Image: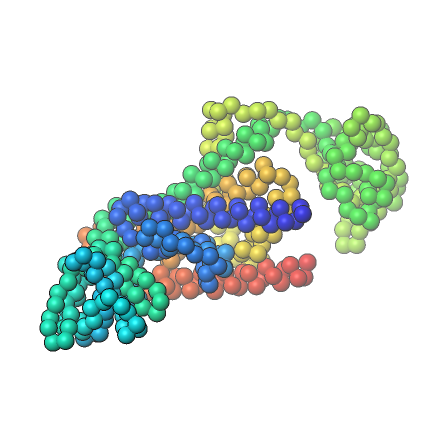
Amino acid sequence: MEMLQIIIMTVLMFFLIVTVHEWGHYYFAKRAGILVREFAIGFGPKLFSYKHNETQFTLRMLPFGGYARMAGEDPELIEVQTGQTVAVRLTGDEVTKIYLDRLDTRKNVIRGEVVSVDLEQKLFIELDVDGEKQAFPVHRQAMLTAKGKDTQIAPKDRQYGSKTVGQRALAIFAGPLMNFVLAFVLFALHIQMAGIPLDPTHLEIGEVSKGMPAAETGLKRGDIIESINGVAIGTDGEKMINMISESQDKQMTWKIRRGDQQLEVKITPRAIEGQEGGKVGTSIVYYQPTRSAGFGETLTKSGEAMANTTQAIFLGFKQLINKFSMDDLGGPVRTFELTGQIAKQGIAQLTQWAAILSLYLGIFNLLPIPALDGSRLIFLGVEALRGKPIDPNREGMVHFIGFAMLFLLMIAVTYNDILRLISG
């Protein structure tokens, strides 16, 4: 049951972080009047899908991220060509559906050969119907139907490329921005749950390894270490580790407190192959009392956590560039593994970890790597300086290559993560 809860909490955390990011793109694109065709969480085959207003909301199999697909961002897959035979259905005097296949099965339609068509600006279609040319206005939300799938047309003013540089930049930047907002909120929630730490007051037993002296003598997680061989320990963890290391195969006397009980434990450290000195098989935890945080203090500490974590993330990028190693990279498998370990520590720790991941996702997406939001913003910046857009085909090719490279890297990292899990 505990494992199931951890899996559910982990999945919900990733779902929240990715959904908030894509919602930023979606919301500001809609505000700019852009048609958002699909709001997807994940990539690959669909697991779940439903349509609301003009947007198809989908959950996909591969948990590598998500996307908000805007009309005009990529070449339209379905087009109506002159000379093509189609069938149209009218509502009033406007075309609301254009059928591109299975024309013989369509009822209550007008069938003819396309003489001319404009589904972006003038919004009309002209057909040759039994030798007679007939022109029909097309509704702004008309559907193209082919292979059992409806695709809404996108008039020019509803396409991504028709909007100002500022509107497009905001729609792109809004994804990382929402991750920064979410990170701040999650850091604040963590501070409210965990409180403000005060100075450590004592050391406690942490994890106890099976088959080691600590487990054999009955030490338990949470036992407070008061003295070893008559020497008070306080919060000096280094002193405790040195005393254990120097007492290999020598019996030690530990005085511990367990709740209201004072206990004396005899324990003999022993050697572990490949490590120096005596070991007892425990970790130690610095016990830190906490106090509640006020509203203003919560905001201040959240800002500090954002700044400190951002600094740590960029330091990690720098170290990765200076000394690249596949073992230093972690994909979805490794991240899920770490998240599961953190989830076992409690909701407060998981909330803090979610804040770190959300901040990381926002920063990573702003890097100038093709296919990421940062690269798209650079193209928009160049367009603003030039006064005209870069060739969409060239930009699309850059993003396609970047996405392919990132996807291959993700596969390699995931493979490495799986090997690491198998080998232990």
Q: Residue placed at 62% from the left, 47% from the top?
A: 6
Q: How is the image coloured?
A: rainbow
394 vs 21, left or right, is left
55 vs 341, left or right, is left
Check the image and name the residue furthest to the left.
Answer: 132
363 vs 226, left or right, is left
157 vs 322, left or right, is left
Question: In the picture shown, does residue 86 fall above or below 123?
Answer: below
Give residue 346's position: percent from left, percent from top. 62, 39
**Residue 87 or residue 169, whichever sits in front:** 87
Check the image and name the residue furthest to the front.
Answer: 108
Tell me the quarter of the picture where residue 50 sits.
bottom left
Give residue 321's position: percent from left, percent from top. 48, 54
Give residue 181's position: percent from left, percent from top. 42, 38
**Residue 204 or residue 138, whichever sits in front:** 138
Tell me if residue 247 can be seen.
Answer: no
Tell me the quarter of the picture where residue 328 sits.
bottom right
Q: Residue placed at 12% from the left, 68% from the top?
A: 134
Marker count (numbered): 0
Q: Residue placed at 54% from the left, 30% from the top?
A: 192
**Residue 240 or residue 15, whichever sits in front:** 15
Tell me if residue 252 can be seen.
Answer: yes
Q: Residue placed at 32% from the left, 53% from the top?
A: 54
Quarter of the picture containing the C terminus is bottom right
**Residue 247 or residue 338, whichever sits in front:** 338
